[in-house]
Image (tube, helix red, strand yellow):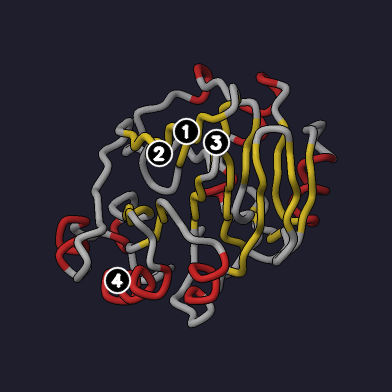
Amino acid sequence: MKVSYHGHSIVKIETNGKTILIDPFINGNELTDLKAEDVKADVIIVTHGHGDHLGDTVEIAKKNDALVIGNAELAAYLGWQGVKTHGMSIGGAYEFDFGKVKLTQAIHGTGYITDDQQIIYLGMPAGVLFMAEGKTVYHAGDTALFSDMKLIGERHPIDVAFLPIGDNFTMGPEDAAYAAKLLQAKTVVPIHFNTFPPIKQDPHEFIKLLDDRSGQVLEAGESIDL
């Protein structure tokens, strides 16, 4: 399994002959190395309905005939736009032919803000556990620190955890470091930082807060082989 980071909260997983893309916010993201029109994906997983996570999902899904996985309300919304979807809910898991997906809780908001100043409710925000080839990847989505991260790590030993550190909208570095301690992942990668002024952070300073030296900063396009 190959896992790569592509700026903000974009994570790509390549396994079992499939490419899985999480939170493909590309257009408008100055920190990504990707171009939406060139992206190849078999599956897209969206943690929640904010624009910086839903991003270019519809365009990429239609171009690639990709399956989009998300919470039930978000899946319904995307289905109305002609996208092939699989809806789930927090705590639920499903075994696909490319791997197992389980949605975890995330403490955050959700909803899509339209051009005419309307907010469309798009279900509960989520984190994602992805399991394949005997490995487990955890993408926390946008979330605050919560104590049940300890249970997530105990129930599903994590090989690599992608944790937001930007503060203001999510955990900041100190809370994310405590989250890493609860999760006990083999490798912790910071995400959701530096894209916008309110979430400016130094990811290397975050790594210094981890007392078990499990942290790794990935630049856009860099990967980890599991």
Q: Secondary structure at mark 3?
A: strand
Q: Is residue 70 above or below residue 57?
A: below
For the residues carrying marks 2 and 4, which lies nearer the camera in this image?
2
Q: Position of residue 30 (x, y in %)?
A: 33, 37
Look at the picture and state if 48 lies above or below 4: below
Residue 226 is tagged as 2
Element at badge 1? loop
Residue located 77% across and 55% down the image: 88
Q: Amino acid at mark 3?
A: Leu
Which of disc 3 and disc 4 is earlier in sequence? 3
Real-space Cα distance between discs 1 and 2? 5 Å
Q: Which mark is residue 177?
A: 4
Residue nearer the viewer, 175 or 15: 15
Q: Earlier in the sequence, mark 4 or mark 1?
A: 1
Mark 1 and mark 2 residues within 8 Å of each other at the beta carbon: yes
Residue at image mark 1: 1
Contact? badges 4 and 1 (CB < 8 Å)? no
Instruction: Name the image quarter holding residue 19.
Output: top right
Q: Earlier in the sequence, mark 3 or mark 2?
A: 3
Residue 178, located in which quarter of the rendered image?
A: bottom left
Q: Are marks 3 and 2 in contact (CB under 8 Å)?
A: no
Mark-to-mark CA distance, 1 and 3: 13 Å
Q: Which residue is mark 3?
A: 21
Residue 165 in the image, given as x and y percentages of width and height: 33, 63
Residue type at mark 2: give it.
Leu
Q: Which mark is residue 64?
A: none
The residue under label 4 is which amino acid type?
Answer: Ala
Q: Residues within 10 Å of mark 4 (few under 14, many from 20)?
A: many
The mark nearer the N terminus, 1 or 3, is 1
- Against 2, is 209 above or below? below
